[in-house]
Image: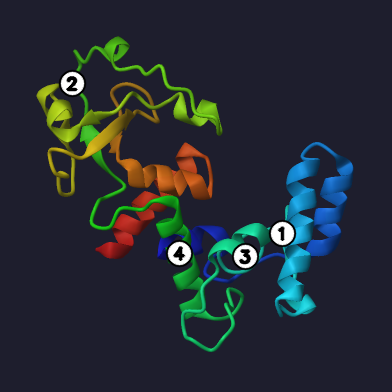
């Protein structure tokens, strides 16, 4: 949660200064992603209808706002009133910000007690050709194309994969392999929790940087 907040807005240091209604209306009119942004414009109006001050609707040019940079539809779905004052304030309230990010993760399927992944060493003789998958992601497929198919931690260990640091997840935990910098460099076994981070921002380098920062924060 802290890593997401830091990545998105430098812990509230910069959350954007575009008028969201104007930005979303312009993006819907422009047309490349008309359905998405038209729906987000309506969601922003629903926020006002539910009591969010119009002055709060300021953020990025693409319609994201607040400490966690939620879109309006995401705010309506997962924003949480962490301190119980009756308002989910993801703009200035730390408790609400963290509760809302946590709610996003829970809604996306985060598994408590399971790491996002672990850095590993890959043996030179690993047959990568046998590790592919026929599954095609309906969302950002090029990101997922870089992942292997799923195997259990026990199966990865049997293939000679060894952890470089951190605790090795339980043998029955499923993971895919990613070599972001190519062969011979640090690789990662990624659990389902990594996919939750990708749900927030579908970029391998974003998700890796969030996971690595979270590990450093936890230390």
Residue at 46% over, 24% down:
145
Res 182 quadrant in image: top left
Residue position for label 4: 103
Return the x and y of residue 183 as percentages of the image width and height.
Answer: 32, 21
Q: Are marks 2 and 3 in contact (CB under 8 Å)?
A: no
**Mark closer to the chain start, 4 or 2:** 4
Which SS class for mark 3? Answer: helix
Q: Which mark identifies residue 76? A: 3
Q: Are marks 3 and 1 in contact (CB under 8 Å)?
A: no
Q: Nearer the viewer, mark 2 or mark 1?
A: 1
Residue at 62% over, 69% down:
66
State the separation of the CA atoms marked 2 and 1: 44 Å
Question: In the figure, is residue 203 to the left or right of 2?
Answer: right
Question: In the figure, is residue 101 to the left or right of 33?
Answer: left
Return the x and y of residue 94 as percentages of the image width and height.
Answer: 49, 78
State the separation of the CA atoms marked 4 and 2: 39 Å
State the separation of the CA atoms marked 4 and 3: 12 Å
Residue position for label 1: 60
Residue position for label 2: 123
State the separation of the CA atoms marked 1 and 4: 22 Å
């Amino acid at each position: 949660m802290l890593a997401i907040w830091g990545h998105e807005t430098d812990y509230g240091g910069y959350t954007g200064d575009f008028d969201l209604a104007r930005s979303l209306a312009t993006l819907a009119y422009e047309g490349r992603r008309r359905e998405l942004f038209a729906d987000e414009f309506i969601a922003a109006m629903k926020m006002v209808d539910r009591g969010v001050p119009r002055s709060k609707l300021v953020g990025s040019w693409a319609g994201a706002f607040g400490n966690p940079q939620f879109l309006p539809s995401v705010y309506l779905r997962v924003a949480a009133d962490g301190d119980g004052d009756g308002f989910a304030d993801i703009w200035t309230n730390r408790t609400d910000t963290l509760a809302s990010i946590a709610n996003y993760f829970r809604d996306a399927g985060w598994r408590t007690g399971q790491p996002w992944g672990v850095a590993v060493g890959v043996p030179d003789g690993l047959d990568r050709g046998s590790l592919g998958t026929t599954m095609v992601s309906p969302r950002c497929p090029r990101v997922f194309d870089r992942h292997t198919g799923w195997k259990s931690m026990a199966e990865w260990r049997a293939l000679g994969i060894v952890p470089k640091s951190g605790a090795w997840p339980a043998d029955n935990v499923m993971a895919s392999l990613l070599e972001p910098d190519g062969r011979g460099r640090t690789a990662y076994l990624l659990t389902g929790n990594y996919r939750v981070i990708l749900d927030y921002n579908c970029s391998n380098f974003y998700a890796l940087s969030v996971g690595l920062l979270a590990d450093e924060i936890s230390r």
